Each structure stands twice: as C-alpha cells, then as structure tokens.
Amino acid sequence: MTVRQLQDKILQLKQETDTCILAHSYMSQDICDIADFTGDSYALSVKAKSAPNSNVIMCGVRFMADTVKMLSPRKRVFLANPSAGCPMAEQMDKELIEQVKASLPDYAVVAYVNTTTSLKTIADVCVTSSSAVKICKAIPQKNILFIPDINLGTYVKERVPEKNFKLLSGGCPTHARMSESDVLRAKKAHPDALLLVHPECRPEVVKYADYVGSTSGIMDFARKSDNREFIIGTENAIVEHLQFDCPDKKFYPLSKDLVCHNMKVTTLADVYNCLKGEGGEEIVMDEETRLAAVKCIEKMIEYGG
C-alpha cells in the first residue's frame, strides 16, 4: 500500500471502531495527518478526556498513554507501539524518590509530566514545561524537590529565585545531547535565524536562545513571528511540521542528532494494526493507583497548569 492508501484505511477504521487518535508533536507527518489531535502530552490528555470516543490510541510514549488513562478511566486507551518508552521518565523510581523525600521532609515534590505513573503517586504537584515556572511560584511551599529533569529544573530555579530548589541528575538524553558547539555551528551556518529551544536543553544552549518554551510554544512562536528563518532546538520532527505549516519560512535543526528514537519507533502501520486489534497495548491501571497518581495533576490544574 502507499502512504495515502494506508491513511485512508486508518481513517475508515477509526470511524468504525469509535476511536480517537492522538499524536504527539514529535510523531512523523504521516501520523499527524490522520490524528484527531496533535500537540504536547498533557494537552493531548485533556483533548482525549473531552472527546466523545470510547477508544483512544496514543501515538507517543508510555507515560503519555498512562496520563490519558488517568484522566479518562472509562475509556479504553492504547499505546500504538508498546516499546515506546521515555528514558527521562524511567530514570528515577518511586523507591529512590521516597528515600530523597525522607531526607528532605519539608520539600514539596514537583514532578514533570514526563514521569511514570508510580512517581506521580508520591508527587505533590505535576507540571508541564510551559506551566512549571507559574506553578512553582504559586504553590505555598518554599522548598521544592524538582524531578526528574535537571535542565528544566535549572531553568525554573533561575526564574523563581524566591524558592529553594533541590535538583537531581535526570533529564532528556535527546535534548541534553545538544551543546554550545552545536549552537555556535548552527548560528554560523544560519546567521539570520532565530534560535528557539526547549527548556530541557542544557543551560549552555538555553543562554543563546531567542525564545525558550514548550514544543507547542516553539511552534506558535515560529508561526507568528515576522522573522523568516529559525533554528529549532527540539526534536527534529518539529522542523518538518513547521516546514509544512509555514512553507514561506525556513527552518533548520539545531543538530541532525536531535532525534528521539522512542518517538520514532511508532509507525503508520503500528496505528493501523492497533485499530485492527492486531497490535498496540491496552493501558490497564487499577483504580487505587490511578487515584493516587491523578492527584498531582489535579493540583496542577488548581494552580493554573
């Protein structure tokens, strides 16, 4: 089959099976084209909650599908490719953070949404990359244990100097792979381009940025900007999507190595097989765990996330 033929079969099957397809922005263009919603992980979870469909397929990584299930417990939720994990989310386990909490009893645990369900059960509040600064300012606690991303944590710490932060050495290996030399090389090749980066990047990269924000924030900035050229400091799929969205502008990757292999493992055929009941994995979560994990997300909403 051609890509278009396979997409047509998927569009037909999702109607027949009452399925909503979610695609994270790091998915390839052929998957985003057949999705009902595309965007950041938390935004997709909210969209799934309001969608009328009884079934949901997440084209992303495991913690994203888990978050959908937390917010939509009565729906059947599937991860399109069961091997799609998140190295950052899996770096720290519940037992480790419980030990750290025991040594820092007056610290609130602020968990990035890129964490496992297990970790969310012991977090006080959850944050996204776009809401982290606002929520850390808003919570009443002065002392914050920020997990797991040290780079995002450093970015937030610098903007919330009135709070005390404890950071651990976790992070996104894809964004952390970028260095100052990558920035200087890209800026030399494209001197008229604005640099837009994700706060999961190292501080040595962030300091050169013309804009720092979430994936959706980066895309919105590029679409609305009067500038014509941009260096994109997040997963290279965003370069491709922006090239489709803004064909009159030029977009360059910060590095050819800014690729998340866990995101790239999901293919259009995976979505097709999941819809046929011949692939994917249904997310099963006991109610006790779900209720414990969703509390930190509810707190995020309370504080304006």
Image (cartoon, rainbow, N blue to C red):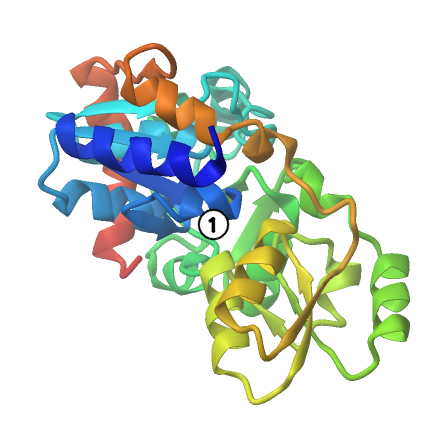
Could you classify mark 1 by the number of other residues whose Cα lies within 10 Å: few (under 14), some (14-19), or many (20 or more)?
A: many
The total number of labels drawn is 1
Q: Nearer the viewer, residue 270 or 217?
A: 270
Query: Up-down: is 176 above or below 305?
Result: above
Nearest the camera: 167 or 203?
203
> Would you name the residue on which mark 1 appears?
25
Residue at 21% across, 54% down: 302
User: Is residue 84 positioned above or below 132 on the image?
Assistant: above
Left or right of residue 77, residue 117 in this image: right
Residue 205 seen anywhere in this rendered image of the structure: yes
Residue 283 vs residue 267, the one in the foreground: 267
- Residue 107 visible in the current orientation: no
Describe residue 102's horizontal placement relative to residue 54 as left or right.
right
User: Could you say which quadrant of the image residue 252 lies in?
Assistant: bottom right
Residue at 53 percent across and 58 percent down: it is 241
Residue 213's x, y, as percent? 53, 64
**Residue 54: percent from the left, percent from the top?**
11, 29
> Where residue 153 sits in the image (x, y, percent)?
58, 51
At 46% across and 21% down in the image, what residue appears?
81
Residue 273: x and y in percent read: 37, 18
Q: Determine the residue located farthest toward the bottom in the rendered image.
A: 226
Q: Secondary structure at mark 1?
A: loop
Q: Name the residue at the top extreme.
A: 278
Q: Quadrant of residue 183?
A: bottom right
The amino acid at mark 1 is: Ser
Q: Quadrant of the C terminus?
A: bottom left
Above-or-below relation of 147 to 265: below
Q: Residue at x 59, y 52 (%)?
A: 152
